[in-house]
Image (spheres, rainbow, N blue to C red):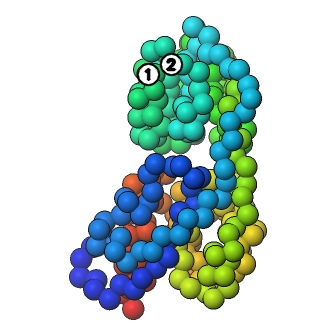
């Protein structure tokens, strides 16, 4: 965050992550910026555990591409796991997995596994909705891999309080973390003209192509830290005029 900006105006920051998510972006941005943010809870989906019994075989290595999968996974029993991102890796380690971070997204994890020519069987524990074609790509390359869905991501209607804010075209920052959540928001928002979208990746930004939004920013890396930095820069730009 650069200094010298003093005329920053208050902005509404949407908390679009599922209810119960421990870390929020409002807590991650610099205090000098956070004081200009008003937070509005607007979860775009609800995490629902599936009524399934899933076991990780003794000779398998678990793959976690989300912290929610760790939450619903079978007991770790000190077994190995490959993870995407620091947050998921930390959650797996806390749950008792011998967790190793392999990249910031599914694509980087796949590349790392192929480069090391992983010979152990791999078990991707995921949600019903996932991206990256992890298992399919690994199998096509000759690795042994399977997937088990542990939870569903049920889409939620956008709250009336948000829809009213959008109609009034108040300045809103909408951080979005998945293509599915982004598509849901893009299709159901009452008005996007005053919405500044901050997307985790180009794939998350894609649903807004051709739509009238105030701004479309993409984090330089797909991490919460870089999302927070993108929000900081955006808030300062909004105050620069």
What element does badge 2 sit on?
Answer: loop
Q: Is 14 displayed left or right of 150 in the figure?
A: left
Is residue 222 in view?
Answer: yes
Q: Nearer the viewer, residue 142 or 148?
A: 148
Q: Position of residue 176 (x, y in %)?
A: 58, 60
Q: Nearer the viewer, residue 110 or 29?
A: 29
Q: Residue at x 65, y 40 (%)?
A: 132
Q: Are marks 2 and 1 in contact (CB under 8 Å)?
A: yes
Q: Give the quarter of the figure containing the C terminus.
A: bottom left
Which residue is the extreme one toward the top?
58
Which residue is the extreme one toward the left?
4
Mark 2–mark 1 Cα distance, whole angstroms, equals 5 Å
Residue bearing the label numbered 2:
76
Q: Give the quarter of the figure containing the N terminus.
A: bottom left
Residue 16 position (above or below residue 167): above
Neighbour tally class for label 1: few under 14, some 14-19, many 20 plus, Cα within 10 Å: some
Which residue is the extreme one toward the bottom?
241
Q: Position of residue 37 (x, y in %)?
A: 42, 74
Residue 220 position (above or below residue 60): below
Quarter of the image for residue 44 reads bottom right
Q: Earlier in the sequence, mark 2 or mark 1?
A: 2
Residue 3 bears which disc, if any? none
Residue bearing the label numbered 1:
96
Is residue 192 in view?
Answer: no
Q: Residue at x 68, y 20 (%)?
A: 54
């Amino acid at each position: 965050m650069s200094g010298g900006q003093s005329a920053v105006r208050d902005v509404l920051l949407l908390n679009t992550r599922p209810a119960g998510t421990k870390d929020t972006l409002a807590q991650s941005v610099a205090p000098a910026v956070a004081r200009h943010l008003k937070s509005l809870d607007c979860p775009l989906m609800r995490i629902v555990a599936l009524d399934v019994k899933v076991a990780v075989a003794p000779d398998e290595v678990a793959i976690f591409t989300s912290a929610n999968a760790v939450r619903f996974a079978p007991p770790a029993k000190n077994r190995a796991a490959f993870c995407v991102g620091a947050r998921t890796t930390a959650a797996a380690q806390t749950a008792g997995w011998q967790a190793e971070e392999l990249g910031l997204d599914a694509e980087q994890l796949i590349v790392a596994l192929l480069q090391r020519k992983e010979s152990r069987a791999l078990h991707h524990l995921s949600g019903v909705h996932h991206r990256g074609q992890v298992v399919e790509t690994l199998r096509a390359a000759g690795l042994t891999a399977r997937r088990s869905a542990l939870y569903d991501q049920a889409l939620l209607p956008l709250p009336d309080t948000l829809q009213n804010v959008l109609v009034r075209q108040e300045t809103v920052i909408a951080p979005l973390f998945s293509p599915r959540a982004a598509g849901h928001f893009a299709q159901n928002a009452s008005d996007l003209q005053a919405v500044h979208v901050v997307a985790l990746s180009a794939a998350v930004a894609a649903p807004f192509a051709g739509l009238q939004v105030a701004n479309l920013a993409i984090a330089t890396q797909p991490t919460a830290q870089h999302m927070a930095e993108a929000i900081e820069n955006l808030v300062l730009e909004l105050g620069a005029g």
